[in-house]
Image (cartoon, rainbow, N blue to C red):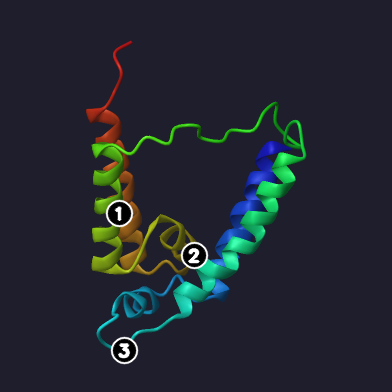
Amino acid sequence: MTRAIALLCGVLFGAGLVVSDMVNPARVLAFLDVAGHWDPALALVMGAALVPSALAYVWRGRRQRPLAAAAFHVPDSRRIDARLLGGAALFGIGWGLVGLCPGPAIAALVTLQWPFLAFAAAMLAGMALHRALHARPA
């Protein structure tokens, strides 16, 4: 049941990215081009995403546990440290260079276009490198 819900959420999220054209790197790069031909579409998509997010937080506050899990998994740390800032900076730099972040890149894999495949391969390599560098001793 949990996997079916996760799959449904992923498909819904991916479909939203496709419908809003957020899988198009040119659309994202145009949003980041505030000094040129700025495109506000990404801001509108982000703003629209706040509605279901806010509703989900209200719903979560009224429930003891989720529908298909034993407990909610909400981060409790509010610490801002070098790892968080460094990761945010790397994410932003990568997003600004190519106009893709993981969600839209994964949704765009269905097109089988080489830029999306290359991005996904690089993303997986980066995840493997992170895991190797930060492996906890057994």
Q: Position of residue 79 (x, y in %)?
A: 37, 35
* Helix, strand or loop at mark 1: helix
> For the residue marked with disc 2, what is the amino acid?
Val
Residue 37, labelled with which disc?
Answer: 3
> For the residue marked with disc 3, what is the amino acid?
His
Q: Position of residue 37 (x, y in %)?
A: 31, 89
Circle 3 Cα neighbour tier, 10 Å, few/some/many (<14 / 14–19 / ≥20): few
| Residue 90 or residue 98, whichever sits in front | 90
Name the quadrant containing residue 51.
bottom right
Q: Which mark's residue is nearer the viewer, 1 or 2? A: 1
* Helix, strand or loop at mark 3: loop
Q: Earlier in the sequence, mark 2 or mark 3?
A: 3
Disc 3 + disc 1, Cβ < 8 Å: no
What whole-number distance in Å separates the C-alpha atoms at marks 2 and 3?
29 Å
Residue 112 lies left or right of residue 5; in this view the side is left
Name the quadrant containing residue 82.
top left
Circle 2 Cα neighbour tier, 10 Å, few/some/many (<14 / 14–19 / ≥20): few
Q: Is residue 11 above or below residue 33?
A: above
What whole-number distance in Å separates the C-alpha atoms at marks 3 and 1?
23 Å
> For the residue marked with disc 1, what is the amino acid?
Phe
* Helix, strand or loop at mark 2: helix
Q: Which mark's residue is nearer the viewer, 2 or 3? A: 3
| Residue 35 or residue 67, whichever sits in front | 35
Residue plotted at (70% across, 55% down): 55
What whole-number distance in Å separates the C-alpha atoms at marks 1 and 2?
23 Å
Circle 1 is placed at which residue position? 91
Circle 2 is placed at which residue position? 110
| Residue 64 or residue 71, whichever sits in front | 64
Q: Is residue 14 above or below residue 126?
A: below
- Quarter holding the N terminus is top right
